[in-house]
Image: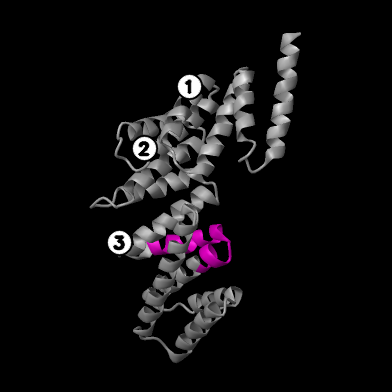
Amino acid sequence: MKHQQKVALLRRQYSKLLVILFILGLSSCDFTSGLNQDILTAQKYVDKQEFGKAVELYERVIKKNPSKIIKTKINYQLAEIYYLYLDEQVKALKYYQFIVDNVDDPLWQVKSLEKIADINFNFAKNFKQSIKAYQILMQFKPRLKDYDYYYLRVGESYFEMGKYQKAREIFNQILSQPTNPHYIEAFNQMGLIEFYNKNWDKAVEFWMEYLKRERRKDQIIKVKFLIANAYESNEKLKEAYNIYYSLLPVYPNPEVLNARLKSLYARRVARKR
């Protein structure tokens, strides 16, 4: 199982645990029998994967102005439904933000901020907000176990915003820490920065260092393609041709490689005339 799939599975398992805690927490609250019935019915909809009906019912419960603890737990449930099951992650933002604004428990604060940061980075593409959320997470004391990951994400967010100098400062800081869990990825990110700044030789230099350390085959293929692209952009046609050719047996879209090879061959022939 790929790393991303494992992470997704663990997140879903964790979220299911939170749902159980959510239900147990609600069962201990004092609320009217009608409100109780609505919540239990909504949870049954969730169990049957009728998420649209669950959302509609939970929203009706919130409009009845229940106690703060019930409202908070329902907001978290709605956030999880949008994030995990309805594939409408951006809609989950306001519900996670409600948790951040209304719950003092560090566990709920951290998990909600992580989701806010992730949604803004991966789905809303609102990198200014992803930086804000990750920086709040980095301020928790004692330092959270994923601090280094948050720092990496801040750098990646600056990169996506086109603020290459700020991104470069962060990745250089990571490269000064060989024990940092994202040390290897920092070489890749530095290569991307130099590539987008059209510093082709410098980009290749960073990516070569990355390839010395990376073991994931899909990432190796991806970065080799980028190296070939950098060579091609830098008019090093022979080097580019050789790398593209070497990728033919493993690249997921050989048609793209064949088109590149054909173009490079024509350019090399034209040079010799």
Q: Earlier in the sequence, mark 3 or mark 2?
A: 3
User: Residue 82 sits in which quadrant?
Assistant: bottom right
Q: Residue furthest top?
A: 273
Residue in front for this viewpoint, 217 or 118 = 217
| Place of residue 215 in the rendered image (x, y in percent of width and height, measured from the top left) | 44, 41
Residues packed near mark 2 inside 10 Å, few (<14), some (14 to 19) or many (20 plus): many
Q: Residue at x 45, y 30 (%)?
A: 190
Residues packed near mark 3 inside 10 Å, few (<14), some (14 to 19) or many (20 plus): few
Distance from Cα at disc 1 to Cα at disc 3: 43 Å
Is 17 drawn above or below residue 164 in the view shown? below
Residue in front for this viewpoint, 263 or 60 = 263
Distance from Cα at disc 3 to Cα at disc 2: 28 Å
Amino acid beneath label 2? Tyr
Amino acid beneath label 1? Lys
Residues packed near mark 1 inside 10 Å, few (<14), some (14 to 19) or many (20 plus): some
Where disc 2 sits, the SS reads: helix
Q: Which residues are magenta?
A: 81-100
Q: Name the residue carrying label 3.
A: 106
| Place of residue 17 in the rendered image (x, y in percent of width and height, measured from the top left) | 40, 72
Q: Residue at x 46, y 71 (%)?
A: 77
Residue 199 appears anywhere in the view:
no
| Place of residue 266 in the rendered image (x, y in percent of width and height, measured from the top left) | 75, 20
Q: Name the residue carrying label 1.
A: 202
Q: Residue at x 64, y 24 (%)?
A: 241
The C terminus is located in which quarter?
Answer: top right
